[in-house]
Amino acid sequence: MAFVVQPHRLQGLIWQALLKSQRISVILENANGELGECLEQIAAAGLTLPEFIILDAETPGLNPYEFCRWCRERFPKIKVFLTRMHVQPLTEGECRWAMNQGATGFFNGFTRETLMSTAVFNIKQILTAAGEPFLDERALLMVLLNIRRQIGTAKSAVAATKPETSQVRVAPAAPAVPQLAGNNGRGHGPAGTGNGLDWVASGLQALNHSRLNPEVKPDEATTPSTLEPAANWPERPTPKDSTEFVRKYRGVAY
């Protein structure tokens, strides 16, 4: 199970979809400074603690490095991965400093230009930290294609609602399009959808897998209608005694 703490809603939803594609349960926690108190309450109640925490380093009211040090002392089994939505990529020195403070890894936020490769790298790092060698490549690629499709649909919907220049009256503002930060030094901007074949090619390259169902074209791939992975995707092999384990979070078994 993973806690995802992201002030940027779209970033949190992408993390949720990626982790669920690998059969990791995800709980989106509020992005505030009460994360430590939340963990203490869960532990005191005897409920299941998360194995991972995906924490944005710019979460309001929370010092990420102080939290990593505290978590390493109080809950050493929990692996904390820091993220940062910033126009400049993380430096090697910043990553080393975060790990010295107790973080398991430090990831760049998802951008429209590098979403595919960044997502694959991040998920691989998390699975490696969990000692899980199995990566469901097909499910991961399908989720990424679905994200691309949804962003493209939202962008088209907004474009269709824009008033023509000849109109004098000011039309109501169109709904905001989900945005990903770009690497162009201008912060947030409309998410580019790119070419579907380019996405598949970059995904296969990032996965180091050149024969991932080559007969399925991007526009013909079946993907869910939401960011959550489809229930009928290939499931991760489970141990024979998996039925003996019952997990609970705040009194709810899953």
Image (tube, helix red, strand yellow):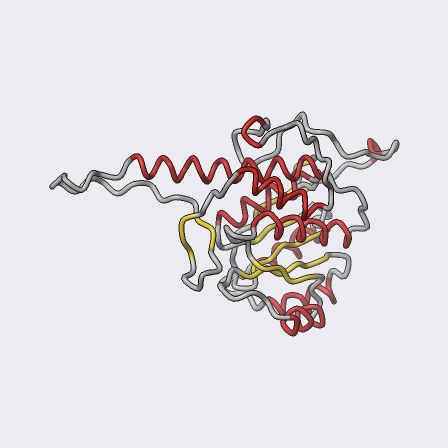
Relative to residue 70, is residue 32 depicted above or below?
above
Q: Nearer the viewer, residue 44 or 53?
A: 53
Give the image quarter of residue 25: top right
Give the image quarter of residue 77: bottom right
Count of numbered tags: 0
Quadrant, the C terminus: top right
Which residue appears farthest toward the left when viewing the image? 168
Residue ID at (58%, 35%): 228
**Residue 249 in picture, x, y percent from top left:** 67, 42
Q: Is 174 left or right of 50, judged from the image as shown?
A: left
Which residue appears farthest toward the right when viewing the image? 240
Q: Is 64 left or right of 180, judged from the image as shown?
A: right
Residue ID at (81%, 50%): 131
**Residue 208 in picture, x, y percent from top left:** 73, 46
Quadrant, the N terminus: top right
**Residue 83 in picture, x, y percent from top left:** 59, 59
**Residue 164 in picture, x, y percent from top left:** 20, 38
Q: Nearer the viewer, residue 250 or 149?
A: 149
Give the image quarter of residue 84: bottom right
Residue ID at (63%, 69%): 65
Relative to residue 17, is residue 123 depicted above or below?
below
Residue ID at (52%, 61%): 59
